[in-house]
Image: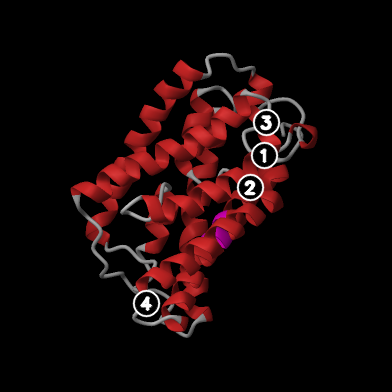
């Protein structure tokens, strides 16, 4: 991807993050309205839309930026030398602003206020542990595939993992600081109260640190070319950053 201009890559991260937030929040609002008083069905609808939507978004923007859409993914990729630190630093604000933009779009699409702070508290020890595990699992999916030459499988694998993690974690698997920030601005089924955001992001960063250690332990061999192709199939990119 070193032949892709930086402004295009940053734009890809912004648009991909905006789509991701719109999918997560929009499907949450739709589920809440279509299946009122049925939280199990609401969660299933939200998870199905998020998992399949994420798959599509990665396919759309992967060839441009790698479709990180997640600052923990960018930081871990930079740690392993897949992208330069300056690239990660450029991606992060694009991801955060993109998720905020997507939240606004989702709110407006369903006739809600453009910005409304969520009142849904998610701060508990169980949620904290869940976000560590959710983030660790996501990174293991991505980097284990990259380190074993199976990057082509990453889009469906990431979508499937996130869809499953909606159910096996008590936090419903945010696993992404940027989307956590964006979901704070939607007082809906998919929202998160500002008081819970710090603990979620802290847990996600811890999950990233644990993932680095586990990945190094289980998959010690990695070339720079493999690191660069975290989500994009090998035949769509050339070289590393």
At a point 56% along the width and 49% down the height, the residue shown is 160
User: CA gap, disc 3 to disc 1?
Assistant: 6 Å
Residue 67 visible in the picture: no
Crowd class of label 2 (few under 14; some 14 to 19; many from 20; radius 10 Å): some
Magenta segment boundaries in residue numbering = 17-21
Q: Nearer the viewer, mark 4 or mark 2?
A: 4
Crowd class of label 4 (few under 14; some 14 to 19; many from 20; radius 10 Å): few
User: CA gap, disc 4 to disc 2?
Assistant: 28 Å
Residue 45 visible in the picture: yes
The answer to whether residue 134 is left or right of residue 15 is: left
Q: Earlier in the sequence, mark 3 or mark 4?
A: 4
Which residue carries the number 4 mark? Answer: 38
At a point 31% along the width and 53% down the height, the residue shown is 170
User: CA gap, disc 2 to disc 1?
Assistant: 6 Å
Give yes or no for residue 16 being in the magenta stretch: no
The answer to whether residue 75 is left or right of residue 206 is: right
Vertical placement of residue 172 versus 185, above or below: above
Q: Position of residue 100 (x, y in %)?
A: 46, 62
Q: Nearer the viewer, mark 1 or mark 4?
A: 4
Contact between labelled residues 1 and 3, with CB atoms less than 8 Å apart = yes
Which residue carries the number 2 mark? Answer: 156
Mark 2 residue element: helix
User: CA gap, disc 3 to disc 4?
Assistant: 39 Å
Q: Position of residue 9 (x, y in %)?
A: 66, 44
Q: Which mark is residue 153?
A: 1
| Residue 207 falls in image quadrant | top left
Contact between labelled residues 1 and 2, with CB atoms less than 8 Å apart = yes
Give the camera-side residue of 44 and 92.
Answer: 44
At a point 53% along the width and 62% down the height, the residue shown is 48
Mark 4 residue element: loop
Which residue carries the number 3 mark? Answer: 150
């Amino acid at each position: 991807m070193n032949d892709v201009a930086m402004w295009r890559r940053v734009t890809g991260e912004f648009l991909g993050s905006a789509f991701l937030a719109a999918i997560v929040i929009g499907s949450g609002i739709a589920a809440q309205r279509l299946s009122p008083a049925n939280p199990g069905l609401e969660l299933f609808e939200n998870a199905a839309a998020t998992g399949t939507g994420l798959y599509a978004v990665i396919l759309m923007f992967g060839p441009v930026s790698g479709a990180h859409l997640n600052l923990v993914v960018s930081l871990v990729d930079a740690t392993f030398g897949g992208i330069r630190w300056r690239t990660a630093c450029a991606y992060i604000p694009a991801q955060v602003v993109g998720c905020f933009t997507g939240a606004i779009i989702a709110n407006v699409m369903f006739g809600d206020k453009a910005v409304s702070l969520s009142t849904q508290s998610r701060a508990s020890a169980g949620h904290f542990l869940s976000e560590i595990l959710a983030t660790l699992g996501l990174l293991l999916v991505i980097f284990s595939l990259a380190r074993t030459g199976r990057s082509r499988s990453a889009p469906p694998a990431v979508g499937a993992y996130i869809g499953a993690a909606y159910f096996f974690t008590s936090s419903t698997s945010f696993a992404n600081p940027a989307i956590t920030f964006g979901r704070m601005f939607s007082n809906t089924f998919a929202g998160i109260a500002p008081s819970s955001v710090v603990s979620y992001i802290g847990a996600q960063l811890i999950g990233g640190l644990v993932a680095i250690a586990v990945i190094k332990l289980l998959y010690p061999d990695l070339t720079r070319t493999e690191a660069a192709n975290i989500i994009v199939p090998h035949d769509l990119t050339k070289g590393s950053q």
